[in-house]
């Protein structure tokens, strides 16, 4: 099997697939963990959203309206080797904007 070469690339389908397939966990009150296969290279990855983001973005909408939706820019964080990846980078280079709202 040929490894996916590193390339900084995005496609609307990446975010759509992640929204459908990633699992959401909350290991502690200050962290949200998204886990699933990168939509480009298909390697399993974890993406943490930390306390600062959670406090800013996940809150109760006291107006009774729809929950606030924000976008989180995510990138592949898989641990697999990808040819041509710059030193110090992780993943395959794929990135996408995922809409996140309080459930």
Image (tube, rainbow, N blue to C red):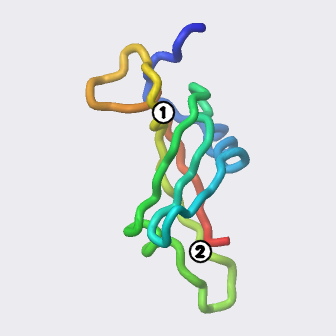
Residue at 65%, 51% (x, y): give it. 23
Query: Which image quarter: residue 8?
Result: top left
Q: Which of the two residues, 5 or 97, is positioned nearer the viewer here?
A: 5
Q: Which residue lies furthest to the right in this view?
A: 20
Q: Is residue 47 above or below residue 4?
A: below
SS under mark 1: loop
Q: Which residue lies furthest to the bottom in this view?
A: 63
Disc 2 crowd rating (10 Å Cα; few below 14, some 14-19, many 20+) is some
Label 1–label 2 contact, CB within 8 A: no
Q: Is residue 27 above or below residue 102?
A: above
SS under mark 2: loop
Query: Which image quarter: residue 11?
Result: top right
- Image quarter (top left, top right, bottom left or bottom right) of the N terminus: top right
Check disc 2 and report the residue beneath it. 68
Check disc 1 and report the residue beneath it. 78
Residue at 36%, 21% (x, y): give it. 85
């Amino acid at each position: 099997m040929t490894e996916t070469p590193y390339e900084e690339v995005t496609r609307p389908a990446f975010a759509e697939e992640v929204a459908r397939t990633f699992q959401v966990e909350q290991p502690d009150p200050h962290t949200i963990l998204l886990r699933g296969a990168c939509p480009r290279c298909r390697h399993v990855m974890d993406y943490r959203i930390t306390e600062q983001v959670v406090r800013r973005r996940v809150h109760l909408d006291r107006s009774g309206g729809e929950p606030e939706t924000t976008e989180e820019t995510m990138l592949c964080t898989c641990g697999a080797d990808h040819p041509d990846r710059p030193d110090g980078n992780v993943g395959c280079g794929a990135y996408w904007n995922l809409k996140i709202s309080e459930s």
